[in-house]
Image (cartoon, rainbow, N blue to C red):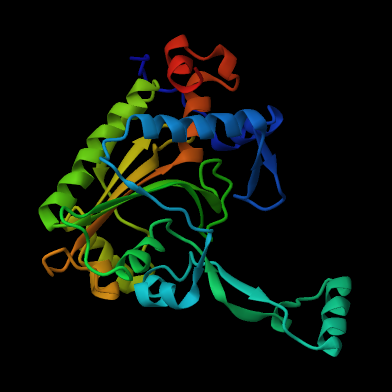
Amino acid sequence: MANVAAAPRRARAEFLADLISAGLLIPSGVDGAYGRGGTFEAVRAAVDAFVTRRSLNVRPERMAFPPVLPRRQLERIGYLSSFPHLAGTIFSFEGDEAEAAELERRVGAGEDWGGLQRQTDLVLVPAACYPVYPAVAARGPLPVGGLTVDLGGSYVFRNEPSCDPARWQMFHQREMIRLGAPDEVAGWRDAWAQRAVEIVGELGLEAAVDVATDPFFGRSGRLLARSQRSQSLKLELAVWISGDEPTAVASFNYHREHFSSVFDLREAGGEQAHTACVGFGLERVALALFSRHGLDPARWPADVTALLLP
């Protein structure tokens, strides 16, 4: 196992500047929206592959979806009630020639042109697991023993611009979902929380799992957060990247019957299914590696590169 001594503390602005200077990240001019250099992308992909090799899933079904979701599905799930501040909706131009000319004029004059766009039927995906539930529900009851779905690394969007180098607006979640009986689903979630500590530990990262809450919006959101914490529905794996506090790089979420109540997910015997999901933030794990071992993977500890970049 790689050395898991605490990572050196680095100021966030300094770490971000170093990442950009080294060509690992490519700034776009908008906080939290970065291109990735070839070395960074190679490490991100290697982390994805390493999680696959260390997976405890048994014969998962592979699925893949685009980073967009039907707007009606997001509404049904209730995301806009809990996280209106994070949602990304898609607008497009549908006007006539006169409106197109007015749009061009406003753009040229540096004026706001958003009023000439109309909302489409699509939104940006805020959690990679969301498309899975209606897709599985459309098949009918789950197979005997439930179902595990592996989405691989999927793009998601969160409207939270930040100068924190670990807080991106568009990033990859390495997402896995379990659907089935309550005890089995909860056990799968808990087992993955333990496995995640082992995975990042092999890569030389010091990590801990703790109960966490989602960033719910408003006064009612504070009540939801307290309920979520009291039931330990959300766990997070945190490691040091930069700044004074550790950063969550993976989450382990037990939804109970929430998605089943929305999409009528049933076990093989007709009982209401429970669901859980596990998500690794691939860019965050990569950032933790660069923070811990340095900006040049060629100089990383041999046992880490043997695991990630054989």
From the top left corner, tell me how far across and down residue 116 is, in percent: 73, 83
Left or right of 73: which side holds 180? left
On screen, residue 133 above or below 307: below
| Residue appearing at x 80%, y 75% in the figure | 111
On screen, residue 20 above or below 128: above
Q: Nearer the viewer, residue 264 or 195?
A: 264
Left or right of 126: which side holds 208? left
| Residue appearing at x 16%, y 64% in the figure | 267
Residue 119 sits in quarter: bottom right
| Residue appearing at x 45%, y 32% in the figure | 49
Q: Nearer the viewer, residue 87 or 133?
A: 133
Name of the residue lying farthest toward the top: 302
From the top left corner, tell me how far across and down residue 128 is, in percent: 43, 56
Left or right of 160: which side holds 93? right
On screen, residue 58 above or below 290: below
The answer to whether residue 241 shows anywhere in this view is no
The answer to whether residue 80 shows anywhere in this view is yes
From the top left corner, tell me how far across and down residue 71 is, in percent: 49, 75
| Residue appearing at x 63%, y 28% in the figure | 39
Residue 188 sits in quarter: top left
From the top left corner, tell me how far across and down residue 308 is, in percent: 47, 22
Exactly how many numbered labels are in the figure?
0
On screen, residue 14 above or below 175: above
Quadrant in which the N terminus is drawn: top left
Left or right of 179: which side holds 298? right
